[in-house]
Image (cartoon, grey):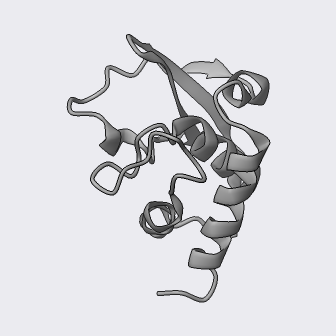
Amino acid sequence: MNFDPDEVQRALRKAWSLSTSSQWTASNPAAGQCNVTSLLIHELLGGDLLKTPLPAGDHFYNRIEGTRYDFTASQFDRPIAYMDVLTDRADAEQGATSEQLSALRAAFQERRIGRP
């Protein structure tokens, strides 16, 4: 898969739903999507899984070819003071169900392949 971060972000915004996070809302579609999103991006593009501890719990995101990508940062009102703690899938999976990951995978691929 060619990696265009802007295309990935657009496809994710369309793919997120209540099926991918119980915190999803139309006004904040990225809410609660960090675990499932970071897992999908890691699955599709490799790289590293990273996290930063926040008051509400760990926030997960990715590093691909040395660059940090946080596709769910828009859920927050303020910028994050990233700590870039290296983690693994088992840690990220604690905050996402296999059903949520399957739903995001299907919706993301549907919106990304052959779509503008």
**Residue at horizontal 39 percent and vertical 22 percent from the top:** 82
Seen in the picture, residue 21 relative to 88 is either above or below; the reply is below
Quadrant containing the N terminus in the rendered view: bottom right
Residue nearer the viewer, 61 or 13: 13
Res 63 quadrant in image = top right
What is the x, y in percent for residue 31? Answer: 41, 41
Seen in the picture, residue 54 relative to 2 is either above or below; the reply is above
Whether residue 7 is visible, yes or no, is yes
Horizontal relation, residue 70 to residue 93: left or right:
left
Residue nearer the viewer, 5 or 95: 95
**Residue at horizontal 71 percent and vertical 21 percent from the top:** 91
**Residue at horizontal 75 percent and vertical 55 percent from the top:** 102
**Residue at horizontal 78 percent and vertical 43 percent from the top:** 98
Whether residue 65 is visible, yes or no, is no
Seen in the picture, residue 3 relative to 81 is either above or below; the reply is below
What is the x, y in percent for residue 37? Answer: 58, 46
Q: How many marks?
A: 0
What is the x, y in percent for residue 59? Answer: 49, 25
What is the x, y in percent for residue 5? Answer: 47, 61
